[in-house]
Image (spheres, grey):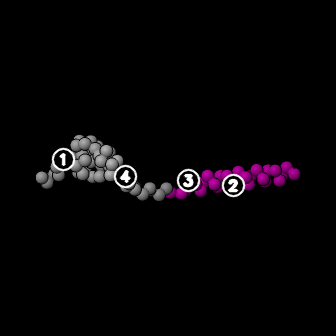
Amino acid sequence: MHCWKVMAVFLLCSLLLSQTHCTSLCQRQPRLSRHRRMTPFWRGVSLRPIGASCRDNSECITMLCRKNRCFLKTAAE
């Protein structure tokens, strides 16, 4: 009877350890970025002024995002 309890505890512990070991091996896949969809009203309200920080051209009121800042002119002008 004692042998069965020890065996059951051993199997339970090995099962739990194998589960935690397997989860650490899984590599996370990078999330795909998705552009925000906004109505024209909210798009106009949320546009950033010149000099504000930005990630892409669609965030700036001038539609020019350079070096993570909203610019008035392009570098070529």
Which residue is denoted by mark 4 in the rendering? 38
Q: How far apart are marks 2 and 3 (CA)?
A: 15 Å
SS at badge 1: loop
Residue 54 badge: none
Instruction: Tell me whether circle 4 and circle 3 mark residues in contact (CB < 8 Å).
Output: no
Give residue 34's position: percent from left, percent from top.
40, 56
Q: Residue at x 64, y 55 (%)?
A: 18
Give residue 5's position: percent from left, percent from top.
81, 50
Which residue is denoted by mark 2 in the rendering? 15
The answer to whether residue 66 shows anywhere in this view is no
Which residue is denoted by mark 1 in the rendering? 72
Residue 24 badge: 3
Observer-nearest of 41 and 47: 41
SS at badge 4: loop
Give residue 68's position: percent from left, percent from top.
27, 47
SS at badge 2: helix
Among numbered discs 4 and 1, the one appearing first in the sequence: 4
Among numbered discs 3 and 1, the one appearing first in the sequence: 3
